[in-house]
Image: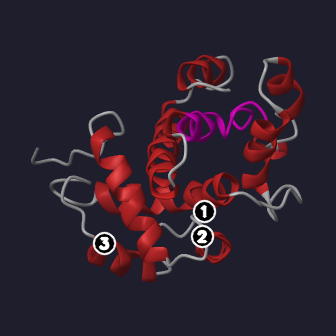
Amino acid sequence: MLTLEQAKALNATMVTEQHLIVHATNVMAAMGAMARHFGEDEEHWKAIGFLHDYDYEKYPEEHLQHTEEPLLKAGLSPEEVRAILSHGYGIVNDVLPQTNLEKSLFTVDELTGIIQACARMRPHGITDLEIKSFMKKYKDKKFAEKCSRETIEQGCAMLGMEVRDVAAICIEGMRPYAAEIGLLGTEN
């Protein structure tokens, strides 16, 4: 089973850009919180989250087309690779998210981008971000407009959850990593 340490080592062989490492950390933190919500293995879900954009920096136009073979060779199980591939459903492939792990990754990949953008605007960053404030920004289609609300809502529907509930779980999961992901704010 993939560990977070292995995921970080593998990711480091392909990803060097700081913003992509921050994104990987955001998704990792959110996935750990989703695992807790579903009573699953936190470290394993975090590892999948951290490694999800393995090939993106080197192959942005062919994202997830250079993932399966190298990760299988690195020792990931077919299920782990499938989970990573599933976050590209309807965007770059047709790997339909089926498990709670896959549905969560599909959803939080975009959702964490909006959470990060929202927290960056606050004096105390993510440390005091409340769901009410987040939802106000989420509903503003021009705010963090590159993050697909359609994908987030599709993922939440797959999970049978409301956006606000998934966002609240992700915010809680990301808070302990505030310093690492640059979301402490300007007044902390």
Q: Label 2 sits on what residue type?
A: Ile
Query: What x and y, as percent, mark residue 152?
Result: 60, 70
Residue range corresponding to the magenta coloring: 44-59
Which of the two residues, 150 or 2, is positioned nearer the viewer here?
A: 2
Query: What x and y, as percent, mark residue 11?
Result: 63, 24
Q: Any mark on residue 97, and which?
A: none
- Image: 1 above or below 154: above
| Residue located at (66% from left, 20% from top) | 10
Which residue extends farthest front?
39
| Image quadrant assignment for residue 67 | top right
- Image: 115 above or below 82: below
Q: Is residue 141 left or right of residue 70?
A: left
Q: Label 1 sits on what residue type?
A: Thr
Magenta stretch containing residue 45, yes or no? yes
- Image: 78 above or below 169: above
Q: Any mark on residue 131, and which?
A: 3
Q: Residues within 10 Å of mark 2 (few under 14, many from 20)?
A: many
For label 2, the residue is 152
| Image quadrant assignment for residue 115 | bottom left
Distance from disc 1 to disc 3, alpha carbons, whole Å, reads: 17 Å
Query: What x and y, as percent, mark residue 30?
Result: 46, 50
- Image: 163 above or below 29: below
Sequence order check, earlier mark of 1 and 3 = 1
